[in-house]
Amino acid sequence: MEEVTTVRMRSLDDLDLKGKFVLFRPDINSPIDQATKKIVNTNRLEKAEPTLTHLLEGGAKVAIIAHQGDSLDYQNLISLSEHASILTRLTGKTVSYLDDVCGPAAIAAVKALKEGEAVLLGNLRYLSEEITAFEKEVKLTPQEMQHTWLVRSLAPLFDLYVNDAFAAAHRSSPSMVAFQEVLPTAGGRQLVAEYTALSNVASHPIHPCVFVLGGGKISDAFGMMKHVLANNTADKILCGGITALVMLLAQDKELGQKTRAFLQDRDLTHFIDEARELVTMWPDRFVTPIDLAYEVDGKRTEADVSSIAVSADLQTNLFPDLGEKTIELYKAEIAKAGSVFVNGPAGVYEDSRWEKATKEIWRAIASCKGYTVIGGGDTITAATKFTNLEDYSYVCTAGGAMVRFLSGKKLPLIQAMEKAWERDKE
């Protein structure tokens, strides 16, 4: 894979950190067990560890600001105390926790830091300035955000701002885009790596480049398909999950009223017209299922799409997985690929009856010779279940930010980092 020649943000390797006060903004928002309120997946914390370790071993005095949950995700809005304990274990260095974001206690804790010490401050989502509703309703520019309580309270305490939160790169909040306005700025290890990996997919793929798009959130797939086809990033798009059903209907393959009702209940039928337009414009780029799996007496059964289209009996079923013929077709395309990008599982893999396509296709991707990038929560969870994450070229922690990036949209974080880079390089 050809590397992106210029990452327009300052590297940590260019900086003398000893004795410097560093404000570190990772994304460590983690899945929570709703019964225990404990973290069940530490992937994002593990991704933040290399940058934090580098800062501490370089002699920096580090204050960490991060979020967990949101006003729209209230069940996950909890303290970051467990996050601090996990970061302590991962780095081998004490990361203390203070349940204050930017008030007097937080300011005192920052001022008391010694070289090689770190404190994780309270959940950013405790502040109204940092919740999704504030971002959407108030709509401040990064320049205007300099006057928010968070920035004016913390910025004067620090010599350097380091962002490592690509997973939140689509968010325009003070913690993500405003400190770059007033502090020297650098990108963390994860931010630079994810930006580079996705830039490779978007701008420098080895052809043939195959996109494997599935899952239940089909707005993600439709958000990027037209862009990656129009700019010739994707040579083939292999359709799975609900995306596959919509694409088949767009090709006038009848799947029955039960499938249409399923899509209508989720307000997804409007994607059929969009899919029809895409197939008309790029008929040779889409690879859609030739057979599907369904349930008979509690057991997995498969039928060709052509048979389903003419059988009223078959059309009474839902189709939660791809069939064996489709799996083999997709595996053959993956084996020929120079690069592969994956977002969304191929079927309802959480149920053992419908895991076959996701399991076999993910294993084919993990073992193929091409450059492979997987991203999104369900994609990574499925990959963890059926494969070894180390077998992929890159595992992207981002979901929404990744989709927007590959859809050709400007990300607020990247814009802020590049603006700071232009200023700081002079």
Image (spheres, helix red, strand yellow):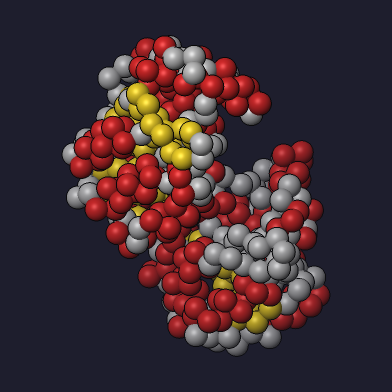
Which quadrant, please, contains the C terminus? bottom left
Q: Is residue 235 left or right of residue 129?
A: left
Q: Is residue 107 left or right of residue 199?
A: right
- Work out whether 189 lies above or below 219: below
* Rendering coords of residue 10 (x, y %): 42, 60
Dividing the picture into quadrants, the one containing residue 342 is top left
- Between 413 and 295, the residue placed more toward the observer is 295
For the point 24% across and 53% down, which residue is it? 367
For the point 37% across and 26% down, which residue is it? 303
- Between 211 and 15, the residue placed more toward the observer is 211
For the point 66% across and 63% down, which residue is it? 33
Q: Is residue 288 left or right of residue 114?
A: left
The answer to whether residue 255 is visible is yes
- Work out whether 250 lies above or below 227: above
The answer to whether residue 376 is visible is no
- Between 290 and 353, the residue placed more toward the observer is 353
- Between 298 and 391, the residue placed more toward the observer is 298
* Rendering coords of residue 215 (x, y %): 49, 39
Dividing the picture into quadrants, the one containing residue 280 is top left
Q: How many marks?
A: 0
Q: Is residue 15 left or right of residue 203?
A: right
* Rendering coords of residue 62 (x, y %): 58, 76
* Rendering coords of residue 404 (x, y %): 50, 38
For the point 60% across and 54% down, which residue is it? 176
- Work out whether 219 lies above or below 148: above
